[in-house]
Image: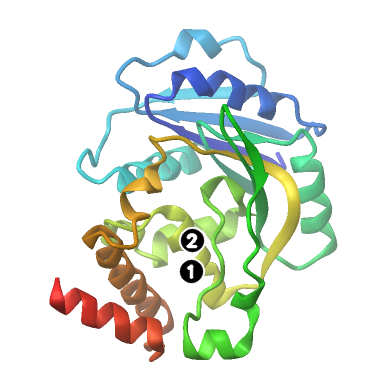
Amino acid sequence: MDFSIIINTHDQSKFLSECIKTCSNQNYSSFEIIVVDTSTRPSKDKYKNIKKLKYFHIKEKYKKFPVLNQMYQIQYGFFKSKGKYICLLDGDDKFSDLKLNNLSKIFSQTKTKIIQDVPSLFSNTFKKKAKIKSYKNNIFFKKILISWPQIFGTSTISCSREILDKFFKRGKPFYWKYLAIDIKLILFAHTQFDLITLPRGLTMKRIHNNNLDKTFSNLISSSFWKRRKMQIEYNFFLKKKNDFNIDYIVTKIINVIL
């Protein structure tokens, strides 16, 4: 088995069928689809005849911390998976039918073990390309302002089984209750492995009012700065040293004020 696509979903039934369909339509043969659902009204019977699909309905373990519940779902799906490579996917997002084919070529032709691709953003009313912040690769920007790479979301991440296994064992992802798996996994990989960012077109990220990250996206909210502080602390945990830059100083000051 080459790929396991792990779909985490919670009360996303109106999007899930479309999500699964884009996985089933892959122009590639060696893969499985694993759905881990914590919905209050599961849809197991609806998907039981879909080839390559395994559906698991489990109880929420971290109701007060949705990002930890998402982490738990992905870990559960990982333990049930058999693929050499793991593709993560939120239940409201979609894959291009060429995604696995493209990933297979990259993984086989390079030594990379983790890839994130640049998504297309869409809703019922618009479709646009996610912005690539090229300045984040500038050495002066990384030294003076922010040291970590741009992060495009859970559904854009694909990695070797080895990396996800090490992440759950060494990265202590459940200790950091405000950080979603995309932040933690990319920071974990960034400090230890080569990370490739692919061109656009392999992932489609849905934008709507119930996106998990909405709670922490408002720059003037206390939640944003609490998570920012935790992100700096997690980066320190991984690197065993702090990056004393402007972001570190400003975040520390604001959290003292809060």
Q: Position of residue 147 (x, y in %)?
A: 50, 81
The residue that disc 1 covers is 188
Q: Position of residue 224 (x, y in %)?
A: 30, 61
Image mark for residue 185: 2
Q: Quadrant of residue 211?
A: top left
Q: Amino acid at mark 1?
A: Phe
Q: Residue at x 20, y 43 (%)?
A: 64
Q: Are marks 1 and 2 in contact (CB under 8 Å)?
A: yes
Q: Quadrant of residue 202?
A: top right
| Residue in the foreground of this view, choosing between 243 and 144 | 144
Q: How are the residues colored?
A: rainbow
| Residue in the foreground of this view, choosing between 29 and 221 | 221
Relative to 83, 56 lies left or right: left
In three-dimensional space, the C-alpha distance between marks 1 and 2, rounded to whole angstroms, equals 5 Å
| Residue in the foreground of this view, choosing between 252 and 124 | 124
Near mark 2 (Cα within 10 A), the count class, few <14, some 14-19 or many ≥20, is many
Q: Position of residue 233 (x, y in %)?
A: 31, 75
Q: Amino acid at mark 2?
A: Leu
**For residue 37, above or below residue 105:** above
Question: In which quadrant of the rendered image does the C terminus lie?
Answer: bottom left
Q: Secondary structure under badge 1?
A: helix
Relative to 47, 116 lies left or right: right
Q: Quadrant of residue 225?
A: bottom left
